[in-house]
Amino acid sequence: MPQTAVSIRRYANFFRKSGATRVLDYGTGTMRNALYLAGQGFTVYAADLPEQVAALIPCPAVQRLAGLMDTEQLAICRLNVDLVVSTYVFNIIPGYEEQRRYVANAVRNLRPGGYLLMEVRCPREGSVCGAGCSHYFKCPGCAKTYTHTELDQLLRPFGLRRISHYYRRRAVAAIYKKSEE
Ligand SMILES: C[S@@+](CC[C@H](N)C(=O)[O-])C[C@H]1O[C@@H](n2cnc3c(N)ncnc32)[C@H](O)[C@@H]1O
């Protein structure tokens, strides 16, 4: 089993102390974070694209989750979880419309006052995407990266306010709180 993301291990205790019990791992991949959190006593739902969910269904470990669903099923759910975790997903989603749909799904399944932990790749200082690109990692053909302030701008319209963040190697992890209304 691949190692749990550092951000998940780092913040798990904070979320527990904040009263979080129900978690959605959105873009679960190999379920590394979902299974870690389930082992820590959280009730964990995991979601991913239909083809990835189909690949995961035969895994016995799925039984340790409260639910596994694809993005189409998630789009009609209201799980009302206390926490959505999203590690290395947002930065690989191509196009603003799909990104917007992703965040809207996360927020709809999050209870008022709940938390979103988002970890994405961040830009390397002084680097550009490639020869001839002037968009600094933001064009669809290049690896996408974000700073915490760029994430703030993208997530604020969804009622998400950043309460903490840190940079580590080539990634930024940030916690957002959904407004209570
Ligand atoms: C780089 S992997 C990260 C997996 C996991 N979060 C982790 O940190 O190990 C990205 C995952 O996001 C999923 N993904 C891509 N686009 C998605 C979308 N629009 N909605 C949900 N999951 C998506 C991919 O199928 C893949 O499993």
Image (tube, rainbow, N blue to C red):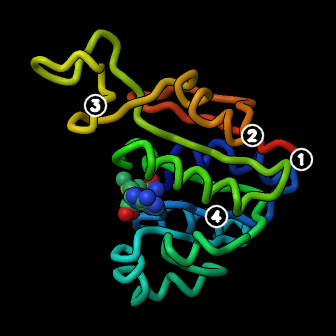
Q: Which of the labelled discs sits on residue 24, or is there none?
A: 4
Say which residue appears at 67% left-offset and 36% top-offset.
Answer: 157
Query: Mark 4 or mark 1: which comes first in sequence?
Result: 4
Query: Mark 1 or mark 3: which comes first in sequence?
Result: 3
Mark 4: amino acid: Leu
| SS at mark 2 in the image | loop
Label 1 sits on residue? 181
Residue 64, percent from left and from top: 60, 81
Residue 26, percent from left and from top: 54, 61
Q: Are marks 2 and 1 in contact (CB under 8 Å)?
A: yes
Mark 3: amino acid: Cys
Label 3 sits on residue? 139
Distance CA(mark 4)–CA(mark 2): 18 Å
Mark 2: amino acid: Gly
The foreground one among 71 and 36 is 71
The foreground one among 94 and 55 is 94
Mark 1: amino acid: Glu
Distance CA(mark 4)–CA(mark 1): 20 Å
- Location of residue 67 with respect to 48 vertically, above or below: below
Distance CA(mark 2)–CA(mark 1): 9 Å
Distance CA(mark 2)–CA(mark 3): 26 Å
Which tag is nearer the camera, tag 4 or tag 2? 2
Q: How many marks overall?
A: 4
Q: Which quarter of the frame holds ligand 1? A: bottom left
Distance CA(mark 1)–CA(mark 3): 35 Å
Mark 4 surroundings within 10 Å by alpha-carbon count, few (fewer than 14), some (14 through 19), many (20 or more): many
